[in-house]
Amino acid sequence: MLRRTLALVVTNVALGATLVVGAALPAAAAPAAIAPAAVTTLTYDDSAAAEFKTAVAQGVAIWNSSVTNVRIVKATAGQRVNIRVIADNGWPRATLGPVRATGSGTVWMGRLAVSQGYNVVRIAAHEFGHSLGLPDRRTGLCSDLMSGSSAPVSCANANPSAAERSRVQSNYAGFAVTRTQVTGRPVVIMDAA
Ligand SMILES: [Zn+2]
């Protein structure tokens, strides 16, 4: 056990050394080493999403086409799952994020709202909005995704507003860079979860 721990430390030191070498590269190569280009990729698992799988995929696709700092992809077999999607008979709900690549959250696709006539793709996109760190804002406006059920039941808009997109962008801006490159302590944090 002790040997294994020591081996990890050595690996970390080696990574740190690699980063230092990278920072010392000629000017032409330096921007690539420090540019905040990291995109957070989150995985989701819809194996318990029952009849909502298609709506969930559509809600995810909407977010992927609305923001660039975070991407949501379906988890492959054996891959770490960040967001579990579960169908149940309650109201839709979700863990409030922003979920990180090292973290996890849950989206519940509750049938109560669907049975009352609320748009199922809007529900999926709204709940994933929570996963990405957006709280509810009951503005009553159909143009707001996070207005949820305060908008009319007939509201079929599943797209986030400009303000909602912007906030998610901010939630994921530069995160990976801060955690993995600037602090120089990436492995400890990434392995914690
Ligand atoms: Zn909500």
Image: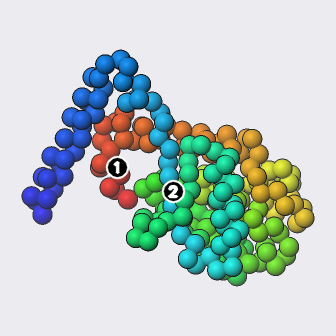
Query: As drawn, which residue projects farthest toward the top?
Result: 27
Horizontal and vertical percent position of residue 18: 24, 35
Whether residue 12 sits left or right of residue 93 in the image: it is left
Going from N to C along the chain, the mark reached first, 1 or 2, is: 2
Camera-side residue of 46 and 136: 46
Return the mark for residue 87.
none
Q: Residue at x 36, y 36 (%)?
A: 181
Horizontal and vertical percent position of residue 101: 46, 54
Identify residue for label 2.
Answer: 42
Quadrant (top left, top right, bottom left, bottom right) of the N terminus: bottom left
In this figure, what is the number of numbered marks? 2
Query: As drawn, which residue projects farthest toward the front?
Result: 28
Q: Is residue 105 visible?
A: no
In the displayed structure, 37 sits above or below 71; it is above
Helix, strand or loop at label 2? It is: strand
Horizontal and vertical percent position of residue 167: 65, 42
Find residue 173 and report its image quarter.
top right
Whether residue 105 sits left or right of residue 7 in the image: it is right
